[in-house]
Image (cartoon, rainbow, N blue to C red):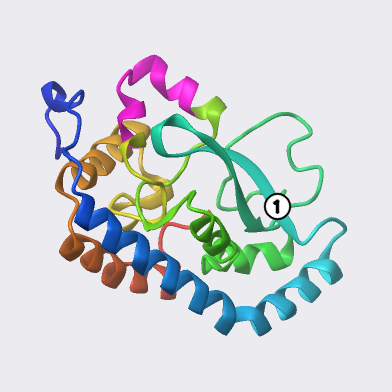
Amino acid sequence: MRVINEQNLVTTIKRKPLYFFIKQLIDSLFSLCSLIILFPLFIVIAVLIKIDSLGSIFYKQERIGLDGKSFFILKFRTMYSDAEKNGPQWANKNDSRITVVGHYLRKYRIDEIPQFINILRGEMSIIGPRPERPIFIKDFEKELPHFRNRLQVKPGITGWAQINGGYDLAPKDKLELDLYYIYHYSILLDLKIMIKSIPVILFAKGWR
């Protein structure tokens, strides 16, 4: 799916202060309310993770966010503690490193819930490109030198690329979809993404 011409890949977006103020306000209020409401679920998930396998409840991993700043994304742990003993690697749908509980947490995106904490910290947004790991960004940039143009907005829990292919997208397709969002962002587009994210979560589309 081609949505951005190659000649436009270096374009810098025009900032809209009012949009970003409203978006940050919505992000903060929604995340705070979600964390309060979902706290009992946190307890249940924490117990299941500890019963299922050894290791911590949460998983922290370095990602690259707005303007290239690094931060540590939070997730419920879905893999065994030694999952990356052989180095960083992509997760596969039937990955043997994924725990039994982790399988369901990933399938229904429940493992992403702790990222509301990242949003309250100002590191992420509800809507935006998914934050990538530094090592993978370096790899992508070898073939896609404009890949860092995705960093002009805060990364998100869900986004235009996620609802149009998600994990199954090739890096170039993901870049094009993310840049489409970045160059056309608006409250209405964010609302459209939120609505379309619901069936993606409910029907476990494109998970790994």
Quarter of the image where one finds residue 186: bottom left
Instruction: Determine whether, in the image, residue 4 is placed left or right of residue 198.
Output: left
The amino acid at mark 1 is: Tyr
> Residue 190: percent from the left, percent from the top?
24, 62
SS at badge 1: strand
> Residue 106: percent from the left, percent from the top?
57, 62
In the picture shown, does residue 188 fall above or below 10? below
The quarter in which the N terminus is drawn is top left
In the picture shown, does residue 143 fall above or below 177? above
What secondary structure is the magenta-colored segment mainly? helix
Please name the residue shown 85% across and 71% down the image: 51
Counting every numbered tag in the picture gives 1
Task: Answer few, some or many: residues within 10 Å of disc 1's Cα (few below 14, many 20 plus, some between 14 and 19).
Answer: some
**Looking at the image, which is closer to me, 168 or 116?**
116
> Residue 194: percent from the left, percent from the top?
30, 68
Magenta segment boundaries in residue numbering: 137-150
Instruction: Determine whether, in the image, residue 207 is placed left or right of residue 193.
Output: right
Quarter of the image where one finds residue 78: bottom right
Quarter of the image where one finds residue 12: top left
**Looking at the image, which is closer to me, 32 or 202?**
32
149 falls in the magenta region:
yes
Q: Which residue is mark 1?
A: 59
146 falls in the magenta region:
yes
> Residue 127: percent from the left, percent from the top?
34, 57
Which residue reaches farthest top? 142
Please name the residue shown 55% across and 59% down the image: 115
**Looking at the image, which is closer to me, 51 or 122?**
122
Please name the residue shown 35% across and 73% down the image: 198
